[in-house]
Image (tube, rainbow, N blue to C red):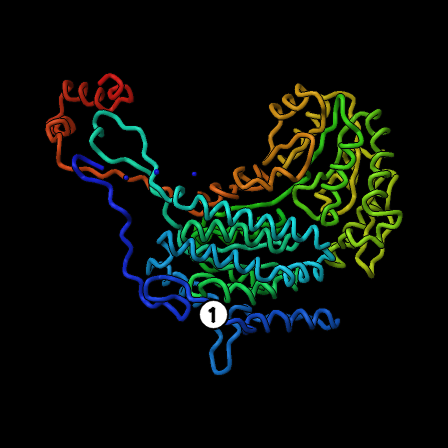
Amino acid sequence: MCGESFGSTSPQPHVVRPFPQVGPNVTADGFFRPRRAGSSPRFQAVQSRRRRREDGASSGPCPRSAMSAPAAGEKMESQSQMVARLRATFRSGVTVPEEFRRTQLTGLMSMIKDNEDQITDALHRDLAKPKFEAVLSEIEIVLNELYHSISNLARWMQPEYVSKSLATKLDDCFIRREPLGVVLIIGPWNYPLQLLILPLISAIAAGNCVVIKPSEVSGATEGLVAELIPKYLSQDCYTVACGGAEETKALLENRFDRIFYTGSQAVARSVVQAASVHLTPVTLELGGKCPCLIYGRINITAAARRLVWAKYFNAGQSCVAPDYLLCTKAIRDALVPALREVLEEFYGKEPKESPDVSRIVSDRHWTRLMELLKKTAGTVVVGGEANREDKYIAPTVVVDLQEDDALMGQEIFGPILPILTVETLEEGIDFINRKEKPLALYVFSDESSVVKTVMENTSSGGFCSNDAIIHMTLPSLPFGGVGMSGWGSYHGRWGFEEFSHRRACMLRGWALERLNGLRYPPYSSEKLKWLRWTTSPHSCSIM
C-alpha cells in the first residue's frame, strides 16, 4: 500500500516490432508456452545448498546463480550474460503488448493457486509460519494484487491526455506509460513470497523484463521460487538469481533500468551506492520504528486484540508492525492486563506450544533480539521466555523504559513490545517527530479530533487509525516509505507507475503555420506580445 493528435492526425496505437522466436517458451506471436513440469537445474542447486545448511555443514559460497545452474553439457551463464539476454529480449518488443503482459500475470496466478500447499510448507520450514498467516499474508494478498492488476491493466496502459494552450490547441498532447527495460527485484526473508511477487506483478504489468532475487535466508521459499518461476513465466523475460551477499553484490555491478529493494537501511545504502555507478533509479522499501500512539477515550479490549494480532503476527517480523506504544500512564495500566488476557486467549498459557506462533528466522536474529532484552532498563511484564534451539521468543511486553533505552535504538523486528508514557497528545506527537519518519504510523482513539491532529502534524509512509498493518492490504492505496523508511511506492496502479516511464508526447501537423510564425525571426515586441498570449494557460479559456 495511474493517458494520444494534431490537426487531422489521429492517435495511432503503439506499433510493436515483429516478435522473433526469442526462446523455447515464447512463440512467434509473443505468447508464452508453458514448460512441462519437472525439477529445474536452478531448483536443484538451491535445494542442495539448503540441505547442506540443514545438515549443519557450512553452506559456503552458493552457485553463482541458481537460475544459471547448467544442465548436463551446458556452460554456466554468467550474470552479465543473463542481463544481456534479458535486454535483448526486451529490445525485441515481446513484453510490450497488453496480451503478453496479461498472459504472464495469469501464469503467475496459476503458479500461486497450483502450488499453495508447497508454498505454505516452505514458509513453515523457513519461519514456522502458521498456515493461516501464510495464506493470509503471502497467498491471498498476492492473488488480490493479481486480480486488481489484470482487471485494470488496459486502463493503466491508456494514454493520459493533458490540458493545452491556444498555441497547441490542434496538437495531440498526452503522457504515454512505457516499460523501463530490465529491472532487478531483491526480496527480503520475512515475507519471502509476498514482498518478492508483489513488485514482480507491477514490473510485469508495466512491460519489463525482470531479474528476481529471493532472500537466501528463507532458503526453502528461495528454492521453491527458483523451481516454479521458470515453469509458469517466460524464461526469456524473467529469471531467478539465487545466492548470498557476495552473489548479490556481483549482481549489482550490472546495469539495470530500476532496482527494487526491500530490506534493511544498512543494506539499502550499499544498493544505492552500487546503483549510482550506472545512475540507476532505485525503489527502497525499508522500515524503521513504527509508532502507535494511544490517547483519549478508547475501547481497551478491542485495542488490545488488534495490537496483539498486528504486533505478534509472524513473530513481530513485519516492517509495518507497531514497534512501540506511546500512551498515558492511566492507559498503560489498563492496557497491560488486557494485553496479557488477549495473549492467553490467542496463544494459550504456553505460547511456545501454540501452532499459531511463528519462530525467529535464524540464530543470528534470535541472538540480536535477546541481546536487546538483556540490555533494556525496562521491566518485562509479559513474556520474556525464550529457547535458542527452537528460535522461540515469547510475545513480550516491556514497560518503564526511557527514550534512550536499548529497545528504542533500532527497529526491533521481533515479538517485543515496549510501552513508553507521555502526559499529553502534544508530547506524543513531539516524541514521534524527533525520530526518523516511519513506514507506518498508528493512532488509537475514539476521538476523531485526536486522530486528525496526529495525522496532520506527523509524517509517515502510511497512516492507520484504530488498527495496524491492514492499510497495506488494499491494492488501491500506495505502499511505501518516506525519508529513511523508503523511496517510492507500489501496489496496484502505484506499482505500475513505479516501473513505467511517463513519456511526454506531442503530435503536431502542419496547420496554423501563420500562428507558428510568431516565434520565428526577425523578432519584434509585437510578436512577443502575441506569442505570450497564445502560450498562456488562459488563452484557451478565453477562446
**Relative to 337, residue 351 above or below:** below
**Total tally of numbered discs in the picture:** 1
* Above or below, comparing residue 90 to residue 70 in the picture: above
In this view, the residue in front, 103 or 375, is 103
Residue at the far top in the pictured view: 542
Residue drawn at x 67%, y 69% is 50
Residue appearing at x 64%, y 49% in the figure: 137
The quarter of the picture where residue 540 lies is top left
Element at label 1: loop
Q: Nearer the viewer, residue 174 or 414?
A: 174
In this picture, residue 541 sits left or right of residue 26: left
- Residue flagged by tag 1: what amino acid is it? Arg
Query: Is 290 situated left or right of 536 in this image?
Result: right
The quadrant where residue 285 appears = top right
Left or right: 215, with 108 as reference point: right
Vertical order, 504 against 521 (above or below) = below
Say which residue appears at 66% left-offset and 21% top-offset. 448
Q: Quadrant of residue 131?
A: bottom right
Q: Position of residue 359 (x, y in %)?
A: 76, 55
Q: Identify which residue, 439 or 32, lies in the foreground.
A: 32
Provide residue 492's location: percent of width, then percent of height.
50, 43
Residue 375 screen position, x and y as percent? 83, 45
Look at 65% across and 49% down and name the residue there: 136
The residue lying toward the viewer, choosing from 456 and 522, is 456
Quadrant position of the C terminus in the picture = top left
Rendered location of residue 484, percent (x, y)? 60, 40
Quadrant of the image containing the N terminus: top right
Q: Is residue 317 left or right of residue 257?
A: right
Mark 1 highlights which residue? 35
Label 1: how many Cα within 10 Å (few below 14, some 14–19, many 20+): some
